[in-house]
Amino acid sequence: MGMGMGRGPGGTIGVNNLYLTRDGRPFVPVMGEFHFTRTPAAEWEEELLKIKAAGVTIVSTYAIWNQLELAPGRLDFTGNRDLRHFAELCARHGLMLFLRPGPWAHAEARFGGIPDWVVARTRPRSDDPAYLAEVERFWRGLYGQVQGLLWKDGGPIVGVQIENEYNLTGEGRGRQHIATLKALARRIGFDVPLYTVTGWDHTVYPRGEVLPVMGGYVDEPWSAKTVPLPPKENYVFRFASRVSGDLGAQTQSRARGDAEDDTADTPFLGAEYGGGVPVMYRRRPIVSPIDIAAAVNTQLGSGVNLLGYYMFHGGANPLANGRTLEETQDSGGYNDVPAIGYDFQAPLGQYGEVNPVSGALRPFHYFLAAYGDRLATMTARAPAVQPGGNGDLATLRWSVRSDGQRGFLFVNNHVRQQAMATQANVRFQVKLAGETVTLPSRGVTVPGGASFFWPVEMDLDGARLAWATAQPLTRLEEAGGPIHVLAATLPGKVELAFAGDTVSRLSVPSRREGGRVIAEVLPSRRAIRVTLANGRTVRLAVLAAADARRAWVGDLAGRRRLVLTAAEAFFDRDRLVLRQRGAERFEVAIFPAADVSASTPLSHGGDIYRATVRGTAAAALPVRQVRAAGEAPPVRIGGPARAAMQPLPEAHRAAAAWTFTVPRTAAAGFLEIDYRGDIGRLFDGADMLDDAFWDGRVWRVGLKRFADRLGRPWTLSVLPLRSDAPIYLDESARRQVPASGQIAELRSVRLVPERELVLTAR
């Protein structure tokens, strides 16, 4: 393959037709998108630590051209645009970096990120010499920022994505344009282990020169439909094609994409599995943690060997000389998105808050860190009976990834907004080279909404786990030897079946059956001792599903540890930082145990530390209405999507407005705005701080970012939402809209403090 230099002081990155390698070993990284220009530089380091704590190993970032060049010929890499500093922070904390320099990024940015003046006088996304000259100038500026920080130099940058969602053909376009851009990147100096292109929406590229990366989203906010979508293919295991359906490319093609014919020669890599979905003007879906987790489970069960998310961390669009840079239909884009808000319902939100979806995804990430080298070599195998299509909600969906000797069984019984049939008395047959494994020993019930994977013939440091009705989470080391941690996946007891020739006894009641030692255990934080046939011991802990969602894995005081807490967590050398909104009482368990201290008094019982961090309680802010709502104009229909269009600026004259003052003491907290309407906008004087399209959720605004603006009046405006607006809202939100007329209403504005507990390990 036409990849660049893979060797560097940090080791060797390689690739074959099945998986990535690090120092010659199979490697399944987790990649999460985080846009440096969409978060203040002062917050980068802490946000990167949060990303790392969630199990991400590679940070990917667009270098959005029009957010870096605010005036013709004046690239700006200072302050919040300091790419070099961002890359150095990734290196400091052991995170790899994947650079996505476009030049077309999409990213819900104006003109896909290409500056207006380049669009106006060149032929973008082609081999037009005038366009390529502008791209070369931009890319040389980027290279100047990252020179010396490539993987070969000991830096974090392991890859470059060329263009995005490229399916254009014709003179100066097509495969040749991607080849031209790659050659330009190499000539400038971007010599990296991996070069990729996006592989969906009928993409074209020079095969052998770049690796296609895949994606999928559980809803389509770019759709023009105003009703729930049919069942998405992301919930069905893939055995033929890696390519999802519509992922929102702004250009259309009906030709067969090159990625469809490249599967034998390239590994199954992902870059844009939605960690959430954006809220766009005409379509505002709200996704749940299981919506996202079930789709991730099916992709892993289909063979994905790079789990890449878009977005993993939300952000805020910067302004350029007072002008907004978001994608709009009025500027020729296919979508209308908020001018500033780019939260994306991601695991880490726009203001760095940890959202519940994080807890549903982290177990996958920790599994890949501990056992991904095993999964990487395994290919997806289809069961004899498969669903008849995306809409078949009665047939159980499952897959096995196996190397012939061992494997992992993936099961999905969840589809967003659909009621899946409960599957009773379920057992599976997995054919391996020497035997057919039938598991579990007795039939189980798989309820609708369940999604999980189980190990088959998994080696646990000498104990061969024939199967478990629990999902592997991580592996820890302590003085007594290794501890393998699993997580329960179904209600009730978990069945553990060991090969009888590798295990002599367990520390819990067990039975011998068919050459196996089988135990049924209730989930617990207490480890089970497994005595091997040779007398050595291995321990196994089976956590409850709720504990798995509270799990964090990271390095603390020189040792890999598992932390169980309902709080948000990240690791910073010898410090474990815990935060939570509102609640005063912290509770945390650390395995293996650590000797910790805190400035706040700690109580310690068993494995659990407890502390209370007092402070100002959550409270409603007094607000004063300063303008009543006028009549909102009818929603425009048109644009490239021929669907509902975002109102013109003049429409906001109909917005209702309220004013309130946030105390200067409230910087360590969030503003929660409970409103009903079409568009909410928050102002400090003439400066818009944030905006949102109402979707039924409470709008949360982090106050730390605006600390220098606190103590003076802010204004909230709410444009009325007409009952006849042809936009999609989930049913929970639609029920809050009157059957006729319009709504522009403010229920409350609350201050919710964020409390912090820092534990220092000795």
Image (cartoon, rainbow, N blue to C red):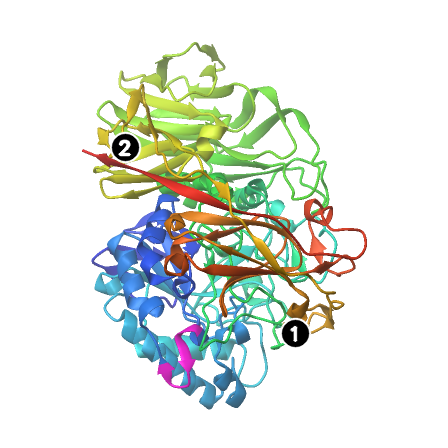
Q: Is residue 70 magenta?
A: yes
Q: In the image as oriented, which residue stretches furthest toward the left?
A: 762
> The residue under label 1 is which amino acid type?
Glu
- Point out the image quarter for the C terminus: top left
Image quadrant in which you'd find residue 517: top left
Q: Nearer the viewer, residue 314 or 43?
A: 43
* Image mark for residue 650: 1
User: What x and y, as percent, mark residue 224?
Assistant: 71, 63
Say if residue 374 shows up in the picture.
no
The residue labelled by disc 2 is 600
Left or right relative to 379: residue 78: left
Q: Is residue 214 magenta?
A: no
What residue sits 67% from the left and 70% below the top?
651
User: What x and y, as percent, mark residue 75?
Assistant: 36, 79
What residue sits 51% from the left and 79% below the top?
125
* C-alpha distance separating marks 1 and 2: 52 Å
Q: Residues within 10 Å of mark 1 (few under 14, many from 20)?
A: few
Left or right relative to 575: residue 729: right
187 w.r.t. 191: above or below: below
Q: Nearer the viewer, residue 216 or 398?
A: 216
Image quadrant in which you'd find residue 637: bottom right
- Are the residues tagged 1 and 2 within 8 Å (C-beta)? no
- Point out the image quarter for the N terminus: bottom left
The residue stretch that appears in magenta: 67-74
Left or right relative to 529: residue 451: right
Q: Residues within 10 Å of mark 2 (few under 14, many from 20)?
A: some
239 w.r.t. 84: above or below: above
Dot 2 falls on a residue whose secondary structure is: loop
346 w.r.t. 337: above or below: above
> The residue under label 2 is which amino acid type?
Thr
